Image (cartoon, grey):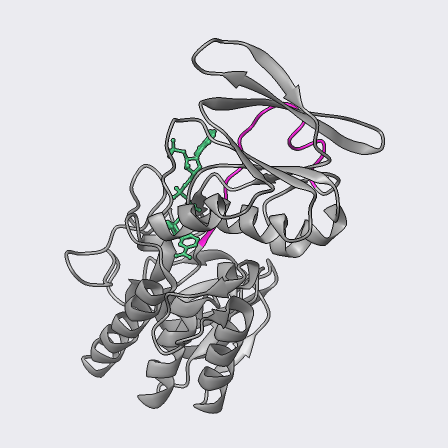
């Protein structure tokens, strides 16, 4: 069976930065990319808050540069997802895509987080035919049409602004009387004339027919009144859940599934297993904090391996 020195699960900023550091420490890291090569950055547009890019940088370009940097320094990047593992003893045993088994002396979990869905009627039925969690992937299909974005965080604002450039009208459906998003993103939303914010609005049902979505039913939280907003696309931006399920039998997580690391370090409860990025980040969830935690995880993995 193949034995890997440092196995990195995930290919976002955390995974690639861990790989850059591990490769430069001569640890021959191997990345298994996971289902979404490049992670969430590939679903964003311009990233304005990653230092080093005074004019901003396209999210896909940024993460692709990280990939190329990791590869140039000696990382092997493989397509594949860790589908099960046994972390009870070393070397750790991991199964890729339910078929290939590998062993690893150390493991960095950088599997990120995936978009949450609401669980309202119509949502799963119309997933892919009117319901999406990625405006940059699917916005094109709704050119010159009316769409709704659900959520009031930075992701929702980013999606709404992006969609406002191609759609006729964008409704932002927000369950409170204020947004969670940063002031900078709220300012961008306010500057777009074709974005209308519907405050205190609870999404109740995605409505449609055989042709696809034709509305979103919402309830006014103050009056209790229900109405259907006519739209042909519904974009969900209601947060993310950490991709830790595969590791959860061995690795301590909180009740939401975020990996719990030992205080102020990327170490998990299993010696030799480290966590980096959104899968272990309850608070910040930024590309730059993910990258920084990937660096810390690789440094700790190196120290751990040297101590063996
Ligand atoms: P988020 O900040 O958790 O916001 C989720 C939004 O969805 C909130 O407005 C929340 O409302 C709403 N929501 C949650 N459940 C809902 C439900 N059942 N029904 C209706 N609305 C619901 O998630 P995010 O926007 O994905 O951002 C995650 C992290 O990534 C944040 O730290 C953010 O700063 C970061 N991020 C940064 C950038 C950037 O800097 N450019 C871009 C994207 C994301 P409540 O406020 O009422 O809870």
Residue 245 rendering spot, x and y as whole percentages? 44, 47
* Residue drawn at point x = 50 percent, y = 78 percent: 67
Secondary structure mostly seen in magenta is: loop
* Residue drawn at point x = 26 percent, y = 59 percent: 270
Confirm whether the magenta stretch covers residue 124.
Answer: yes
Residue in front for this viewpoint, 282 or 53: 53
Magenta stretch, residue numbers:
113-127
Quadrant of the rendered structure where residue 269 is? bottom left
Residue in front for this viewpoint, 66 or 219: 219
- Seen in the picture, residue 33 relative to 261 is either above or below; the reply is below
Residue 85 rendering spot, x and y as whole percentages? 44, 57
Left or right position of 252 against 115: left
Residue 258 rendering spot, x and y as whole percentages? 33, 47
Left or right position of 61 against 213: left
| Screen quadrant of the C terminus | bottom left
* Residue drawn at point x = 45 percent, y = 15 percent: 221
Residue in front for this viewpoint, 197 or 70: 197
Left or right position of 15 against 65: left
Ligand 1 quadrant in view: top left
Left or right position of 254 against 225: left
- Seen in the picture, residue 233 relative to 208 is either above or below; the reply is below
The tally of labels here is: 0
Residue in front for this viewpoint, 96 or 64: 64
């Amino acid at each position: 069976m193949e034995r890997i020195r440092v196995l990195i699960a995930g290919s976002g900023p955390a995974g690639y930065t861990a790989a850059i550091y591990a490769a430069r420490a001569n640890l021959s890291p191997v990345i298994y990319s996971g289902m979404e090569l490049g992670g969430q950055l590939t679903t964003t547009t311009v990233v304005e808050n990653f230092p080093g890019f005074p004019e901003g940088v396209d999210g896909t370009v940024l993460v692709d540069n990280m990939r190329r940097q990791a590869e140039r320094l000696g990382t092997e990047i493989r397509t594949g997802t860790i589908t099960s593992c046994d972390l009870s003893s070393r070397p750790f045993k991991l199964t890729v895509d339910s078929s290939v088994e590998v062993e690893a002396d150390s493991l960095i979990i950088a599997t990120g987080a995936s978009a949450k869905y609401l669980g309202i009627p119509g949502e799963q039925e119309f997933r892919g035919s009117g319901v999406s969690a990625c405006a940059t992937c699917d916005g094109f299909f709704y050119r010159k049409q009316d769409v709704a974005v659900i959520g009031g965080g930075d992701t929702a604002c980013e999606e709404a602004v992006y969609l406002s450039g191609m759609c006729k009208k964008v409704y932002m459906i927000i369950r409170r009387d204020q947004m969670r998003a940063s002031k900078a993103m709220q300012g961008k939303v306010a500057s777009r004339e074709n974005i209308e914010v519907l405050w205190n609005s609870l999404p109740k049902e995605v409505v449609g027919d055989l042709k696809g979505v034709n509305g979103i039913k919402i309830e006014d939280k103050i009056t209790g009144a229900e109405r259907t907003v006519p739209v042909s696309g519904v974009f969900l931006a209601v947060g993310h859940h950490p991709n830790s399920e595969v590791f959860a039998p061995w690795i301590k997580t909180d009740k939401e599934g975020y990996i719990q690391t030992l205080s102020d370090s990327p170490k998990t409860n299993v010696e030799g297993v480290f966590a980096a990025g959104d899968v272990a980040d309850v608070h910040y969830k930024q590309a730059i904090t993910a990258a920084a935690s990937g660096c810390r995880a690789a440094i700790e993995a190196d120290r751990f391996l040297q101590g063996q």
